[in-house]
Amino acid sequence: MQAAKIAALSLAMLLAVASAGFAQKDKNKDSSTRSVSGVVTGPDDKPVVGAVVQLKDTKTKNVRSFYTQNKGEYYFHELSPDVDYELTATYQGAASKTRTLSVFDSRKDAVVNLKLNPK
């Protein structure tokens, strides 16, 4: 009976240590990524809802897109800190200048606002 209690306690301690290890691993994973967010505005400096923001990975050339939300906001997460990204916004024929999120930008949560140029 005593051996069963010791075995159960040992198993509980082992599971607690393993869970803590996995939690730490996930925490480290999050610290190895970054995000970028911002607001898309029109030529009149008002936020644009429904603009398409494209994020291009300059290494792989993969493009991710996001439609701006209520206040013209966009957000991309889980980005590699070892890659440059190009950001552009378009809406009803108007487009922003291309902005770059550089590997030299060490911010974990970068903010890049985009302004649409008149058609």
Image: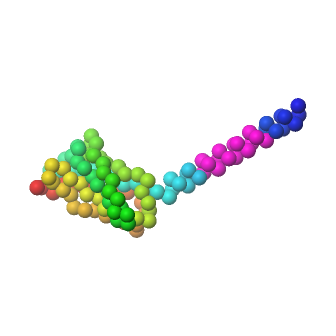
- Give the colouring mode of the picture: rainbow
The quadrant the N terminus occupies is: top right
| Horizontal side, residue 22 vs residue 61: left or right | right
| Horizontal side, residue 21 vs residue 5: left or right | left
**Residue 22 drawn in magenta:** yes
Q: Which residues are magenta?
A: 10-24
Residue lying at the far top of the rendered structure = 1
Residue 85 seen from this side: no
> At 37% across and 63% down in the image, what residue appears?
60
Residue 103 placement (x, y as % from top left): 40, 66
> At 53% across and 54% down in the image, what residue appears?
29
Residue 119 placement (x, y as % from top left): 11, 55
Residue lying at the far right of the rendered structure = 2
**Residue 85 drawn in magenta:** no
Q: Is residue 9 above or below residue 119?
A: above
> At 30% across and 48% down in the image, what residue appears?
66
| Horizontal side, residue 116 vs residue 24: left or right | left
* Quarter-of-image position of residue 62: bottom left
> At 12% across and 55% down in the image, what residue appears?
118
Main SS, magenta region, reads helix
